[in-house]
Amino acid sequence: MTKPDIDASKLTITLTQTPKELLDQSELKFGKYFTDHMLCIKYTEENGWEAPEIKPYGPLAIDPAAFALNYSVQAFEGTKAYRAADGTINLFRPEKNLQRLASSSQRIMLPEFDQEQFLECIKELVKVDQRFVPNDYGYSMYVRPNFIGTEPNLNLVYSREALLYVYLSPVGPYFPRTVKLFANAIEARAWPGGVGSFKLGGNYAPSMRPAMDVVSKGYDQILWLLGDDHYVTEVGTMNFFIFWVNADGEKELVTAPLDGIILPGVTRDSLLALARQWGEFKVSERKITMPEVVTALEEGRVLEAFGAGTACIVCSVSEVFYEGQNLAIPVDPTDPDAVYGPLTKRLRAELLDIQYAKTPSPWSVPL
Ligand code: COI
């Protein structure tokens, strides 16, 4: 007999008795403040998915021997809800995040789930806490689905119990200015045959020590290089793009290909689609190496570089430290104080206009 899947019609809602005060938008640091409610959906192999519950935000009861706590059986997502000028709220391409969550969780043997029904439950959660969705461009409500293995069992098999839960965090800009990257070719974020294309907490924890090392040197993030040829992969919190005149003399926007090493970012995909629609320059998903970037910089062929991700949106990269040298990346040659280069600014603006429903788009999904 088939076991029950997620069923949004069975959702129950228990409202908090102690609603939080809303913070002023200027106080919204990324990921430090959470709303009143969360969505929890339990699974057991024996009985399938239980009825979804929205309940007051608070600690989870989890067995100390759970798979998630011992063996990092945890996958997560990040998507956002945006308030349009008319007050309505939209999610941005949430189905892409749920497809990726399904792909990440299958890699760690977490159970399948009905993505459409799960999305209906997420929409209900955002509706319940909609008063927390900020108003202005650059501010939004970050939606963090988490999927964990909860069975207490130390055997290295797979978790036959799981919890899918979602909480919300009203957020401001992740990087309010241009970012400085430190290219790391010694440690690797991901490697061929590894799990870099899955959004697993286990990919992020080992990046913290190297990342904090570079923060202590005054950089914002690591640009992860891979292999002897110093393949430019991604940043970890965001995918990396370069806009240059390539070695053949063509204007080209390039980002690393989805070769199993790169996280398939929803912002990455959206920017590639926008740039391809314009049809004004070559748009490539291909491998480039750091020595190629250095040569292009020396020859004055690098026009802009930027990172893109749900949390960071789109932010210009102004510097990369590589092999003992600080390489300055042009942001906007016409404006020394510019935070975004011309292409970065245009892509960011078109993306935000869609996210905040100023430009109608099928990517905007109303609650
Ligand atoms: C996101 O952009 O949603 C992320 O997951 C990045 C996060 C690690 C800060």
Image (tube, rainbow, N blue to C red):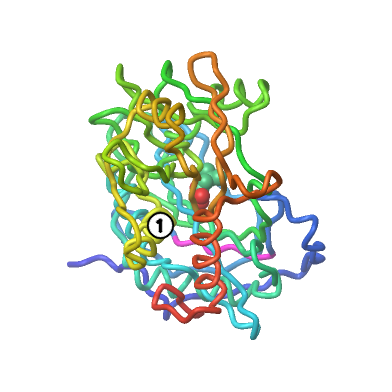
Q: In this view, does 38 lie to the left or right of 279?
A: right
Q: How many marks?
A: 1
Residue 55, relative to residue 365: is it above or below? above
Residue at the (37%, 23%) spot, across then down: 291
Q: Residue at x 65, y 81 (%)?
A: 85
Give how far across and how far down residue 352 sits, in percent.
55, 67
In front of the other: 274 or 109: 274
Element under disc 1 = helix
Query: How would you rate the neighbour count of disc 1 (Cα within 10 Å): few for under 14, some for 14-19, many for 20 or more?
Result: many
Q: From where the camera sits, is residue 82 visible?
A: yes
In this view of the protein, which residue sits in the foreground, 113 or 43? Answer: 113
Secondary structure mostly taken by the magenta-highlighted segment of the chain: strand
Q: Mark 1 points at which residue?
A: 266
Q: Considering only vertical position in the picture, is 262 above or below 193?
A: below
Q: Position of residue 91 (x, y in %)?
A: 50, 71
> Where in the figure is residue 238, as x and y percent of width and height?
48, 44
- Residue 350 counted in the magenta span: no
Q: In this view, does 132 lie to the left or right of 329?
A: right
Instruction: Name the residue rendered at 50%, 79% in the picture.
Output: 359
The range drawn in magenta is 36-41
Callout 1 amino acid: Val
Q: Does the magenta stretch include residue 38?
A: yes
Where residue 138 appears, as percent x and y from the top left, is: 64, 61
Q: Does the residue labelled 1 lie within 8 Å of ligand 1?
A: no
Residue 98 visible, this angle:
no
Task: Say which residue appears at 50% left-offset and 67% top-offset.
Answer: 350
Task: Work out whether 35 lies above or below 72.
Answer: below
Question: Which image quadrant: the N terminus?
Answer: bottom left
Q: Residue furthest bottom?
A: 86
Residue closer to the observer: 218 or 71 = 218
